[in-house]
Image (cartoon, rainbow, N blue to C red):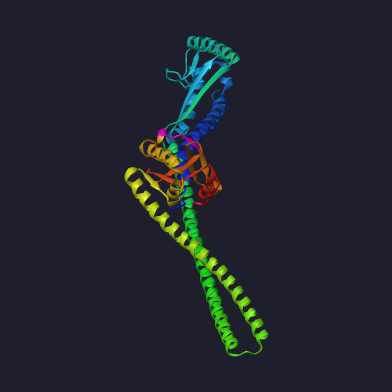
Amino acid sequence: MKHFPFKILLLCILLPPVCYIVTLNGLEKYLGKRVTESVQELMIRDQQALYEGRYTIKEEISRNIGRFLAKDFKHKIGIKTEILVKTGEDRILYPSQARLDIASPFQEEKGFAESGLESLRYTEVASENYRILNEGLILDLDLQIGQNTWLSNSILIAYIVLSLAVLQAFIRRGKRQTEKEEEEQKSLVQNLSDQLNHAEEKLNEVEARESEYVERISALRKDKDELARDVDGLIEELESQEAGLKDQKRIREEMTGQVALLKDELDRLLQQSRKIKKTVEATRKRFAVLYRGLLFTDRALEGFLSLTDEFQLKAEETIYKLNQDESTISVKRKVFGKGGKMDFLETTFAYSGRLYYQKDSQARKNIVAIGTKNTQEKDLAYLESIK
């Protein structure tokens, strides 16, 4: 297929991983901000209990954050959350290795002496809690989306499916464009053939009239020789017929030249078409043997053959590198098709040479078009027309 969207193919190959990475980073920042806000709101819920000394700030924070993480569904889809809570003096409050005791001290009955000791402990705990709250709490939250998880794999698959849909649309459009060009070529040949037939018919008419004039002139000359009368009239008639014959000869010569030009143009077009097809097929076979990892469209082969010998050497050097190791090729830019749904890669050779390619579904490189800076506008229009 001439109009294969190699640039769109390359874009569809490169964009999914790029969009995947950008999406994960953005999603991590967004979710990290939301979770940070949620943790800041919930890690201290019962300040009155803290001021009364019923339990420490570390117990309050560990209890609340533990419940939050236990109810959080994000870890099931591959989101890892690490939370660190410190005091203003860099003393870590969470995570804590100590076992939480969420029972209230007032849940058990104690003696009079024990109640006094508990009251003293509550006062110390309340004082410590008050001091820590006045210093302020520092929350450090690190949220990461793991690789090869449900969430990350779903995002990547969505981008890959979208890229395949875009590539399919551009391949269909390229096929329609190729069929249209073939129809235009057939129409051009048919028009030239019709013009040639019309010119030949007119030439036959002129030749018939020329023969008629010759016959009439011969008859008049015979009459002049046989009859010796009305010489002046015969001479005038003869001159008139000779003038008509001269005009017809001039018209015949013009029509003969026009027919010859049309024949030459038609022959040149047919020979050029056959020669191009023969040369393109020969070049395709040679490239198929030399560069097994590459595919070439007719447009690319025709563009290669239209180059000068020096440019062909430079172009084939680039083709060789692309076949051996794509990483040695310097990509100048990505060229998008119409609507931005497909893409091609543009690389240069010999400064003004241009080569456009992309990869197919079997990881082979497809050379779509080869040309120079002078043909770049037509090449880009060709790439845009690929479906």
Residue 159 appears in view: no
Give the residue drawn at x 52%, y 63%.
Answer: 261
Tell me residue 188's x, y (percent): 51, 63
What is the residue that sits farthest to the left in this orientation?
A: 289
State the extent of the magenta-drawn residues as a range.
327-332
Q: Residue 140's x, y, as percent?
A: 52, 21
- Residue 329 shown in magenta: yes
Q: Taking 44 as reference, is 89 above or below it?
A: above
Residue 87 is covered by the magenta coloring: no
Which sits in the foreground, 20 or 51?
A: 20
Give residue 228's position: percent from left, percent from top: 62, 89
Q: How many marks?
A: 0
Q: Residue furthest front?
A: 228
Image coordinates for residue 22, horizontal then vertical, percent: 51, 34
The answer to whether 54 is drawn above or below residue 358 in the figure is: above
> Does residue 272 appear left or right of residue 120 in this picture?
left
Q: Is residue 5 above or below residue 259?
A: above
Tell which of 188 and 153 is nearer to you: 188
- In terms of image quadrants, where is residue 292? top left
Say whether residue 259 is visible. yes
The residue sitting at 50% across, 9% down in the picture is 117
